[in-house]
Image: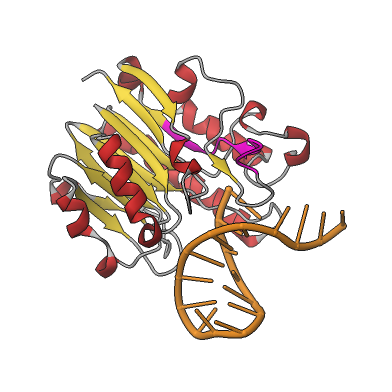
Amino acid sequence: MKLATWNVNSLKVRLPHVLEWLGENPVDVLCLQETKLTDDRFPKAELEAAGYASVFCGQKTYNGVAILTREPLVAQDVELGIRGLEDEQKRLLCASVAGVRVVCAYFPNGQTVDSEKYVYKLRWIDALLSWLASELERHPELVLLGDYNIAPEDRDVHDPAAWQGQVLVSEPERARFRALEALGLVDAFRLFPQPEKSYSWWDYRMMAFRRNRGLRIDHVLLSGPLGKICSACVIDKLPRKREQPSDHTPVIVTLDR
DNA sequence: ATGGCAATGTTTCATTGA
């Protein structure tokens, strides 16, 4: 079983990329973030024609998440948002696939550490943490895939000195990433040897991709039982090399089942 | 110290992202 996550930065623009990528990478599950589409505009039929069922939860201009699966989804297993959190923003979606609870998340960006958006980011993650604690009891086989907007360690940052204390790397954010791990979740990417300077996002400006000035902020966290059957986790840089790419690139995880 | 790129809608600029 293969699962992937990809912040597409507008599914309207990136649908051809997604379809082509799925053709080359026929994963069982693909979680998307920043679809930036209201549900009435979601390209359900086009994805179905490519062999994928979808559930989605979107809004105009910002945010929006979706889960694509090769197997049909059971509607009653689908859940939107974090239970117990009042939130207008469409950032979280869950579904069950082959007994695995799949959580697709688009964490808030936070803008700057002195902004209201940063306060919201921390509050959102705190709500996620307490919700996940109970969710893990209900679903021991759980995977949290998405754009976390957190680079967990300095090795996930191209220039740690320049980023020191900034949003995406600040200590309160990193502490929350560790709190996710303390729930028993493991960072699938770090279960395996990886190339030095592996990142999942590069700024569009300053030729950042070509210079590999990036951050690793897209992650797959696995619950304990799934960590034990995980056999690979890779970042696929190819889509970032295309014309008109998303600034993020997919992360793919393989489970032995 | 600043902006640099891309997408969106309110569009011919402002806002947001990361």
- Identify the residue at image location x=67%, y=33%: A158
- Identify the residue at image location x=54%, y=34%: A177
Residue A225 on image: x %, y %: 30, 19
- Identify the residue at image location x=14%, y=39%: A71
Residue B11 on image: x %, y %: 55, 85
| Quadrant placement of the N terminus of chain A | top left
Left or right position of A148 against A35: right
The image quarter containing residue A214 is top right
Magenta region includes residue A90: no
Kindly tell me whether residue A185 is visible in this rendering. no
Secondary structure mostly seen in the magenta stretch:
loop
- Identify the residue at image location x=29%, y=36%: A24
Residue A36 on image: x %, y %: 40, 62
**Vertical relation: A85 (above or below) A211:** below
Residue A114 on image: x %, y %: 71, 56
**Which span is picked out in magenta?**
A208-220
Query: Is residue A205 or residue A159 the one in the foreground?
Result: A205
| Quadrant placement of the C terminus of chain A | top left
Kindly tell me whether residue A75 is visible in this rendering. yes
**Vertical relation: A161 (above or below) A10:** above
Magenta region includes residue A212: yes
The image quarter containing residue B16 is bottom right
Query: Is residue A59 or residue A80 the one in the foreground?
Result: A59
